[in-house]
Image: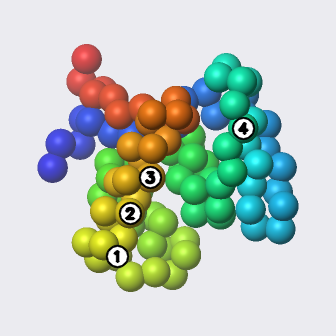
Amino acid sequence: MDTLSQWCAVDFASLRMVDWDGEFTVFQPAAGKTHFLNEMGLQVLILLDQSPATLERLCQLLAEHFSLLLDESFMQQIQQTLHRFEALGLVAYVNFSQ
């Protein structure tokens, strides 16, 4: 496993969030866009803002937080979410060895 390449949140502090009973409206000023996230999506951003993480570590933290089974299907779902978030500019995949 490449522990030098990890996911991290991008400009998390600038996001404006409103909680709508477990669903979240997230305004991203840099892009001028609003995103709608569930609790897990928001937790992904919070965890990656606190500390960059590999996919494996992030999935482990999410499975513990939500009391879910950490299996291949769960990891694939989180990986898809990370790629969507990357396309939106909410997260980035970076190599910390540089």
Amino acid at circle 3: Thr
Mark 1: secondary structure: loop
Mark seen at residue 77: 2
Amino acid at circle 4: Thr
**Where residue 2 sits: x, y (%)?**
18, 42
Mark 2 → mark 4, Cα distance in angstroms: 22 Å
Mark 3 highlights which residue?
81
**Where residue 17 sits: x, y (%)?**
79, 44
Do the CB atoms of the residues marked 3 and 2 lie less than 8 Å apart?
yes
Q: What residue appears at the point 46 percent right and 80 percent down from the top-left corner?
A: 68
Amino acid at circle 1: Leu
Residue 85 in the figure: left or right of residue 25:
left
Mark 4 highlights which residue?
34
- Point out the frontmost of discs 2 and 1: 2
Give the crowd class for mark 3: few <14, some 14-19, many >=20 residues within 10 Å: some
Give the crowd class for mark 1: few <14, some 14-19, many >=20 residues within 10 Å: some
